[in-house]
Amino acid sequence: PRPPVISNPSWDRRPTIEFPERALSRGIEEGRVEVECTVNPNGSVSACTILSESPSGAGFGQAALSGARRARLSPRSVDGVATGGKVRFSVPFRVQ
């Protein structure tokens, strides 16, 4: 069976994202990345992949993956047992 997809993640620690230098050097001021990760029973994430990146080639995807590795979700439980799953989320980028 496929793991459940968590559509409204409850974050213990949100992804911390740094704006990519490559985008800044090209004058790009915003972007967006869609990411999917495996959620482990303890709430940590692993095996993150980029589903989409806009604009591509400006470093947003790698920045999103780097930040996602430090994220943590509130563990889910089914019948009192911690379970994992998959989570999909958007990472917006904007120059501050």
Image (cartoon, grey):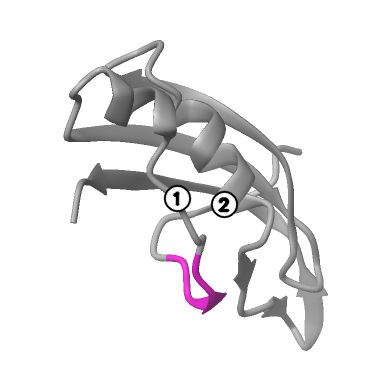
The residue sitting at 18% across, 56% down in the picture is 96
Gap in Å between the C-alphas at discs 1 and 2? 8 Å
The residue sitting at 59% across, 51% down in the picture is 68
In this rendering, the answer to whether 23 lies above or below 88 is above
Using the image as rendered, state which of residue 80 and residue 22 is in the foreground.
22
Q: Which residue is mark 2?
A: 67
Q: Are marks 1 and 2 in contact (CB under 8 Å)?
A: yes
The stretch of residues the image draws in magenta is 9-14
Q: Which residue is mark 1?
A: 18
Left or right of residue 75: residue 60:
left
Using the image as rendered, state which of residue 26 and residue 78 is in the foreground.
26
User: From the image, which quarter does the N terminus lie in?
Assistant: top right
Give neighbour class at mark 2: few <14, some 14-19, many 20+ (Cα, 10 Å): some
Asked whether residue 13 is drawn in magenta, I would say: yes
Using the image as rendered, state which of residue 67 and residue 3 is in the foreground.
67
The residue sitting at 74% across, 83% down in the picture is 79
